[in-house]
Amino acid sequence: MSVRNAVAGCLLALVLGAGLSSAGVPAARRAGFSAGLGVNYFAQRDVVDMLNGGYGLTKRLERYHVAVDFSGAFVLPVGERFGLRFEYAYLLNTVNAAGLFAGTTEFTTTVHMPSVVIEYSFLDAGAYNLSAGLGGGFHFGHLHLQYGGLDASYTAQGPGMVVMLVGNTAVSEDLFVHLAGTMRTGMLGELRNANGVSPGIGSEGQPATLNFFALGARIGLTLYL
């Protein structure tokens, strides 16, 4: 048997052992896929302070804005109470503001947030289950600015963390409605364009960063295998 076949066999055994067969196995102890759409209370302090301080806006921007996120995940149970959630989430925030000299200023922030989350299941009632998770990953952010004749893009990257509370309630034996609350923080560091230039000065008098905080809620579906 080749090494490739041996590895494939081990992976198959792991997945099967995680409960791919639904017969007699509670949903929360089976592997599954989930996907959802979320709304977030989103703060990027440095970017907002940079725009308020150096872009001639007619009205100061509020610190918090609404952002949406799209997420997908594969969940693999590890024992009776614990599981691993391999999640990819994409966050989007767009804000328009009036400028004194340059008309409308538009800035759009996007963040790619791959994460690995350790979950603990503290309630499994068959038709519904609840779990809490803590995890993180390496995130990638992008800021697009349109200001007068300026049309510029800046990027940043760095670690991010997430705390989540996840609930699933049954629609059928394998399909569940997925509900979750999340709290995220990203420490993505300084924004730079392709030439290494910063878009401006942030809250602490240093080049602006794409550090952020987000508090969100989402709804979607979970399919247990």
Image (cartoon, rainbow, N blue to C red):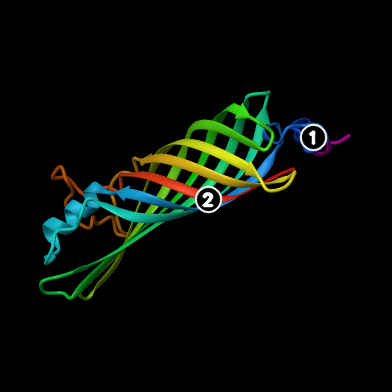
In the rendered image, the vertical position of residue 103 relative to residue 114, given as above or below: below
**12 sits left or right of 196 in the view:** right
Q: Amino acid at mark 1?
A: Leu
x and y percentages locating residue 2 in the rendered image: 85, 36
Pointer 2 local density, CA inside 10 Å: few below 14, some 14–19, many at least 20:
many
Residue 171 x/y as whole percent: 68, 48
**Residue 47 - label:** none
Callout 1: helix, strand or loop?
helix
- What is the residue that sits farthest to the right in this orientation? 1
Which of the marked residues, 2 or 1, is nearer the chain's N terminus? 1
Relative side of 6 to 180, left or right: right
Identify which residue is drawn at 56% across, 30% down: 119
Residue carrying label 1:
16
Which residue in the protein does label 2 denote? 219
Q: Gap in Å between the C-alphas at discs 2 and 1?
A: 28 Å
Would you place residue 52 above or below residue 128 in this image? below
Up/down of 72 relative to 128, above or below = below
Q: Which residues are magenta?
A: 1-6
On the image, the x and y values in percent for residue 91 come to 43, 53
Q: Quadrant of residue 126?
A: top right
